[in-house]
Image: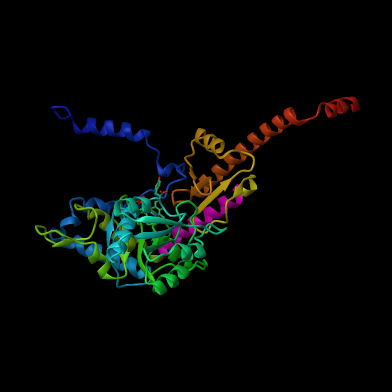
Amino acid sequence: MDKKGIKRRQISEKLKEFKREDMTYKSGRILGSMCTCPHEVGVEAYYMFLESNLGDSGLFEGTKKIEKEVIRMLGTLLGRKDVCGHVITGGTEANIMAMRAARNSRNIKNPEIVVPKSAHFSFKKAADMLGLKIREAELDKNYCVNIGSVKELISENTVAVVGIAGTTELGVIDPIEELSKICLEKNIYLHVDAAFGGFSIPFLKEYGYNFPKFDFSLPGVSSITIDPHKMGLAPIPTGCILFRDKNYLKSISTETPYLTEKEQSTIVGTRTGASAAAAWALLKYFGRDGYAEIALKCMEVTEFLAEGIEKSGFKLIRKPELNLVAFKSDEIEIDDIVNELENRGWAVSVSAYPRAIRIVVMPHIKMKHAKEFLDTISEIHAKHGAKNIQQDNRKKTPLKLVDKTIQGK
Ligand code: 0PR
């Protein structure tokens, strides 16, 4: 750090220089992210509450009320008004809190959790921090968790089973209803990770999408992760964890004797109230209809992309269930496709299981971007197709045949 400070104008110029190196969602070129342009209503609310600290919430009674209202609104959306929870940094923190509550609610010496093979890597972090053994359940042919495999992996050491409503890599919804039945029967904590799907499944359902039940309307569901900073259009960091029962929050609380609140259940201590304000503002601003419109538009672009990708000669991994398309090619290596796309300015990501190019169709991806993307991949397919044909001709055409062709002329 220099001894003397510099002028605000210089700072702003310097920062702009840094910013020029960043990609922007608005460009429509970021195809592999679950975040998007934060909506201005949320940004304004965020600014208003920059100094608010929910880590010492007795000083910020107003923000505390906002947080409670957000949790109640989201609980109602997800099948239960009477939930408790917190507005936190995102899906990772929510999943860690849920696994901690599950572990602390039972007294098991060698605790284990059963998670689908498709689970987000935050469960690995949780397991490492909390001393949990992870048992990975197999997936079925549609990449949903295989119920038989979950049953096989449950043991007397199981403290939690996890189901996913919108997987990170493919956006599929696990059969949570069946998991709920199993967990009720065996008295095991069931956590649903709806970090991605939580802000679209309920709205799309109202418009006729035939999705399975995944929320607190299922009696076995103990907690749900839902992230306003994904499909909720809130500024980063805004995540939420909801618990069915207050005792779960209690099981992860720590005494905080000198603060205005005498106990705290979140992992983070000093915790911004700005995220809660942003989430509240957006929930009020959009209402269910507004969020439905956003989710429906994303599905429209998703379906358009999926159809176009197939027409361009690529293979879909499966029919998209939510706003995520994954595809591969029988002829072109995935890394080659990624390179070609990156050279043309597209930022895509590659899923690990199954290995495929993955496009998360967030609200910043408009129809015009989808059309441009389809033009690009058609071009890539044609280029590689032509190259393959040339190579094939060079390699495989038998000399005799060439001779014959020449003779026949
Ligand atoms: N659960 C699910 C189902 C998720 O997809 C994610 C993140 C999490 C939990 C963890 O959430 P946080 O990242 O908020 O802690 N899914 C995205 C992913 O890993 C996160 C992401 C977002 C990645 C933007 C890249 C990016 O540009 O793919």
- Of all residues, the one furthest to the left in this rendering is 258
Q: Position of residue 298 (x, y in %)?
A: 48, 55
Question: In screen coordinates, is 383 left or right of 266?
Answer: right
Look at the image and say whether residue 4 sits in the magenta stretch: no
Q: Position of residue 335 (x, y in %)?
A: 54, 37
Can residue 214 be seen in the rendering of this structure?
yes
Residue 310 horizontal side relative to residue 174, left or right: right
Quadrant of the image occupied by residue 42:
bottom left
Q: What stretch is highlighted in magenta?
A: 289-309
Tell me what residue is drawn at x 50 percent, y 66 percent: 211
Give the residue displayed 22% in from the left and 66% down from the top: 250
Q: Main secondary structure of the magenta part?
A: helix
Question: Between 310 and 286, which is closer to the camera in this rendering?
Answer: 310
Q: Can residue 234 be seen at all in this image of the molecule?
A: no
**Image quadrant containing the C terminus:** top right
- 361 vs 150: above or below: above
Q: Position of residue 258 (x, y in %)?
A: 9, 57
